[in-house]
Image (cartoon, coloured by chain):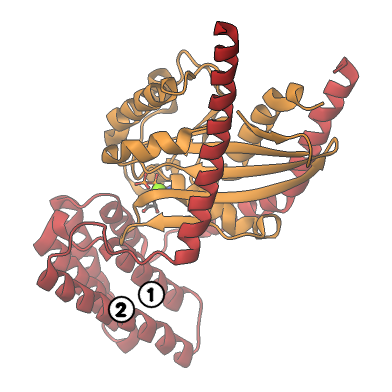
Chain colours: A red, B orange
Amino acid sequence: MDANSDASFRDTLKNRLDEVFQEESSDIQGGNKEDESVKASHPLDGLKSAVLSLEWEITQENVHRFIKETKDCLKRYEGDKVFSTFFQVLLALGKYVHKSMKNAHPATGALIKSTFENVTAVIDTGLGEEEKRKLLNKSLAAFRQFKASVLAKKRKAAPEASETAVPEKTIKTVLMELGNRIESELEKMKAEIADIKRKLD
Amino acid sequence: MAFINLKTKEVQVKIVYYGPGRGGKTTNLEYLYNRLKDHIKTEMVTIKTQGDRTLFFDFLPMGLGEIKGYHIKIQLYTVPGQVKYNATRKLVLMGVDGLVFVADSAVDRRKQNIDSLANLQENLSAYGKNLFEVPMVFQYNKRDLAEKGIPVLPVEVMEADLNHKLKAPAFEASALEGKNVIKTLKEIIFNTALTLEHQLV
Ligand SMILES: Nc1nc2c(ncn2[C@@H]2O[C@H](COP(=O)(O)OP(=O)(O)OP(=O)(O)O)[C@@H](O)[C@H]2O)c(=O)[nH]1
Ligand SMILES: [Mg+2]
């Protein structure tokens, strides 16, 4: 390829990447803005940082902090039925983690996070009473389901990571992709072997 | 080696996200999937354990359209970071064209980052490749932890630990917030595609 066409491949590629990923940069800025508004000291800041620390690693210190922050929130919002139910759920989860520590159900972190996100939405976004209840019910349902699966796990003492129901279609796609790869590698190897043979003959 | 089909004029570029367990590889792909749905058009394939650890790998295909008469297809993979899944990691590396190394900025993940990079080198060598010949971009992820009161490694330390000899492009990022996720991807696609250019006739 001559220098000219090199440059044009480079440029075309660069432009194409800018095109494909263009709207995204504005999305990122959107994300930044949100981030800033959170920084302007939010009533749930303390709890948020405790949730993140706990999600990051289950240690005594992180669990204690999480429980303490949850209790603080319970006190602060005790007049509001919806808010305080959220914090009761979080407190129950905190106590559960405290009891089981590293053996806590692997879905605990995600549930704590989603419950926290829901309560944040309820507090932040001026939702109507009905929408608030809807979010609360969602969190409660998830909590109930979680409790059931913890119990089931206890009963069964399930082997780690074995029971994920992966849709058959997904597995097929993956296997096909892998198969193609391996086939192409095999083809290459066959060619190489044939080549070596020829040289030996 | 990229899959280049001269007959159908299709180029498949395989990019693998590598790095220690829980470093944020899957989160990168999830962010991309959500932001780029229009260009992706297929589903993201992800096989997780009950919690959020990657059990097998994640797979996200996307199209870049036509450049110089070739349909450019990008395939993004993540490896499972957990130490015990090395066979899968090795398999996913087969035929890799470009690498994103997602390092965890949290202070106590320092050793895991270094170990994972060594493991990458070792697994590449099984395919007769080494870190210096495969295009690579470092992503120092989870920078947002600092704002949440969790100590992070200074970027200079991470550079010295991981990128001292390679001198690959590196970005600070927060996959969770989407910061520099796209920038990382653009950089690796660009650098990888340039190395493949001479194979296109
Ligand atoms: N604070 C913060 N958390 C993050 C960031 N990126 C990922 N995480 C969190 O880190 C945890 C692990 O992220 P994953 O994307 O699943 O990590 P992974 O590298 O795919 O892990 P394995 O599949 O085990 O190799 C999740 O709880 C993420 O939400 C980030 O930029 N900042
Ligand atoms: Mg993963």
- Note whether residue B3 is visible: yes
For disc 1, the marked residue is: A119
The percent coordinates of residue B183 (x first, y second) are 62, 39
Question: What is the count of numbered marks?
Answer: 2
Residue drawn at the location 30% of the way across and 35% of the way down: B109
Residue drawn at the location 85% of the way across and 18% of the way down: A1
The percent coordinates of residue A79 (x first, y second) are 29, 86
Q: Cβ–Cβ below 8 Å for labels 1 and 2? A: yes
Q: Would residue B42 be found to the left or right of residue A158 on screen?
A: right
Q: For the view shown, which residue lies furthest in the front direction?
A: A201
Label 2 Cα neighbours within 10 Å, binned few <14 / some 14-19 / many ≥20: many
Element carrying mark 1: helix
Q: Is residue B157 above or below residue B48?
A: above
Q: Would residue A89 be found to the left or right of residue A5 on screen?
A: left
Both labels 1 and 2 in a single chain: yes
For disc 2, the marked residue is: A86
Label 1 Cα neighbours within 10 Å, binned few <14 / some 14-19 / many ≥20: many
Residue drawn at the location 28% of the way across and 83% of the way down: A85
